[in-house]
Image (cartoon, rainbow, N blue to C red):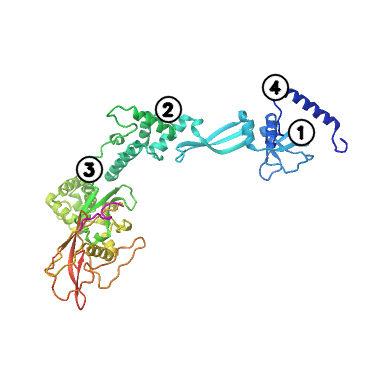
């Protein structure tokens, strides 16, 4: 029977002896035999416990296997396998003849090595990074067994291997740089204080007011205990510290504005750099940016489309009181050499002129160049022509950047050339203004003049959506009859409407026509100019945004 099945009798006796010895050991240990046959995984995991030095890994498109401790072996030619072995194998024995061969090869899974050879694995955690989603510092783990890479690129908490390093990255990226989404109040409060100090830098055009990140890091490092290294541990500690606070004490980890400033930003006050600039009776939001080369560098004022034609170009020359000295100095520097020599040192002259022109009675009254001419003449008896000033030599940030938006706050255009903006958007601005007048103006009755239109409402141009409401007195031209307004690719302004709809007059039945009318839009007041428009067989009453039509 053994000969028919090609079984060596000696090998059979050896197997019977081994089985008998193993059974004796099991009985001596009090173990129970399996009631069911062991699975492939269970059997080979048991074999791996004593054959970890015989494992191998086959690289892609190669014949041989890389073995433990840098060896290379090949599958024995006499190995009879029903299936092609996988990339990970274990050998019953390694035999060296003409080359190193593995005999008794079986396929294994690399995860089995993690369980069986856990005590022999050498692990490294590399490339630690802050994970915003998991709120912890994670690294890429790599494990090797006798030089063979069992796995790599596995994300694990970095604090397991380097608590101090994980804590440092957590403080720097999550707290200092603000890359952590949390509801803890201190972080939002500190970010708000940092934004305030950054606003002071933009207004003063200095980059040395806000303390550097190293000082903010040192503040958190001093306050936090050594074991706080991720979002979970910080939240737990913060709750405990908040409960232990005495009445009147500030919240933990809260920075004050004084702690965030290297020095006082001299001259940066609300009066010198207002957040609201009033132009022609309309409040507009002002934003400041110190970013040379950026289109928004300097002062940016957001103007609703319907008041664009009322913005006074002379008013935009003055900017805000805090920027007046720099602009005057730049204008004095643009003068020819002879008159400029009478005004040296220019910084001192610019400071004195700015102080004189910043008083409420003088500031934004008429043209800046005219006021500058008059004060220079009074100060040094020097006649300067208006053409002596070279505005094209002045830095762009010293000109007001006008940002035009529609009724929904969408940007239509922006630029520092107000005349060019009016040329491009003047007709649409007039149409938007007349549409507003049509909605706000009560219909005139016989014997009454539409002197004032008043509506108590809140409007998106003046509140919300970051839309700054701007307006000033300005000139334009009346569109011809039947002219259509152009549409923008980004937003479509309101079309022109008559304030009284289809009302046509063939006789003077509406009383005295006023020179101007007030249109109230929330807390703002716009000035319109009513006029009669000839329609051949009748006239209609319309309101325009400028007097010269």
Task: Give neighbour class at mark 4: few <14, some 14-19, many 20+ (Cα, 10 Å).
Answer: few
Mark 3 to mark 1: distance in Å? 87 Å
Asked whether, in this view, residue 413 is left or right of residue 473, the answer is right
Report the disc number at residue 95. 1
Mark 4 to mark 3: distance in Å? 87 Å
Task: Give neighbour class at mark 2: few <14, some 14-19, many 20+ (Cα, 10 Å).
Answer: few
Q: Is residue 37 shown above or below 455?
A: above
Is residue 281 rendered magenta in the image? no
Mark 1 to mark 2: distance in Å? 55 Å
CB atoms of marks 2 and 4 within 8 Å: no
Q: Helix, strand, or loop for circle 1?
A: strand
Q: Quadrant of residue 103?
A: top right
Q: Which residues are magenta?
A: 455-464
Rendered-image quadrant of the N terminus: top right
Q: Which residue is mark 2?
A: 226
Q: Which residue is mark 3?
A: 269
Who is closer to the viewer here, 106 or 443? Answer: 443
């Amino acid at each position: 029977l053994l000969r028919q099945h090609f079984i060596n009798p000696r090998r059979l006796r050896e197997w019977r002896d081994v089985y008998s010895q193993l059974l004796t050991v099991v009985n001596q240990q009090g173990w129970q035999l399996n009631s069911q046959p062991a699975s492939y995984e269970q059997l080979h995991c048991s074999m791996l416990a004593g054959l970890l030095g015989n494992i191998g890994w086959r690289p892609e498109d190669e014949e041989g296997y890389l073995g433990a401790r840098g060896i290379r072996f090949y599958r024995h030619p006499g190995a009879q396998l029903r299936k092609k072995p996988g990339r990970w194998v274990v050998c019953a024995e390694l035999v060296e003849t003409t080359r190193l061969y593995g005999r008794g090869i079986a396929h294994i899974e690399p995860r089995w090595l993690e369980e069986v050879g856990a005590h022999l694995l050498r692990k490294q955690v590399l490339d630690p990074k802050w994970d915003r989603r998991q709120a912890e510092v994670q690294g890429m783990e790599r494990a090797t067994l006798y030089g063979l890479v069992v796995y790599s690129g596995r994300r694990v908490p970095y604090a397991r291997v380097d608590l101090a390093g994980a804590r440092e990255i957590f403080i720097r990226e999550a707290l200092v740089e603000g890359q952590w989404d949390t509801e803890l109040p201190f972080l939002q409060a500190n970010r708000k204080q940092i934004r305030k100090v950054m606003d002071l830098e933009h207004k003063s055009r200095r980059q040395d007011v806000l303390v550097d990140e190293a000082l903010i890091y040192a503040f958190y490092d001093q306050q936090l205990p050594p074991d706080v290294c991720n979002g979970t541990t910080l939240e737990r500690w913060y709750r405990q510290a908040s409960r232990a606070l005495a009445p009147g004490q500030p919240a933990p980890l809260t920075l004050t504005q004084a702690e965030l400033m290297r020095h006082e930003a001299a001259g940066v006050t609300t009066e010198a750099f207002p957040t609201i600039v009033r132009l022609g009776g309309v409040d507009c939001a002002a934003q400041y940016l110190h970013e040379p080369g950026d289109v928004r560098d300097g002062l940016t004022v957001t103007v609703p489309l319907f008041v664009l034609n009322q913005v006074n170009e002379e008013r935009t020359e003055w900017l805000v009181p805090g920027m007046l000295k720099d602009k005057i100095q730049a204008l004095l520097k643009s003068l020819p050499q002879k008159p400029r020599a009478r005004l040296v040192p220019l910084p001192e002259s610019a400071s004195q002129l700015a102080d004189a022109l910043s008083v409420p009675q003088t500031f934004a009254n008429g043209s800046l160049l005219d006021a500058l001419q008059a004060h220079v003449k009074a100060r040094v008896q020097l006649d300067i022509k208006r053409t002596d000033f070279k505005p094209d030599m002045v830095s762009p940030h010293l000109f007001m950047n006008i940002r035009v938006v529609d009724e929904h706050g969408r940007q239509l255009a922006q630029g520092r050339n107000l005349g060019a903006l009016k040329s491009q958007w003047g007709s649409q601005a007039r149409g938007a203004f007349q549409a507003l007048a049509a909605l706000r103006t009560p219909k005139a009755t016989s014997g009454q003049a539409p002197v004032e239109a008043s509506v108590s409402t809140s409007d998106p141009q003046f509140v919300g959506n970051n839309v700054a409401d701007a307006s000033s007195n300005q000139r334009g031209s009346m569109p011809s009859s039947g002219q259509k307004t152009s549409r923008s690719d980004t937003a479509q302004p309101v079309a022109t409407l008559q304030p009284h709809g289809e009302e046509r007059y063939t006789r003077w039945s509406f009383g005295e026509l006023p020179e101007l009318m007030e249109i109230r839009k929330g807390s703002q007041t716009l000035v319109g100019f009513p006029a009669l428009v000839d329609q051949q067989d009748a006239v209609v009453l319309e309101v325009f945004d400028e007097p010269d039509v």
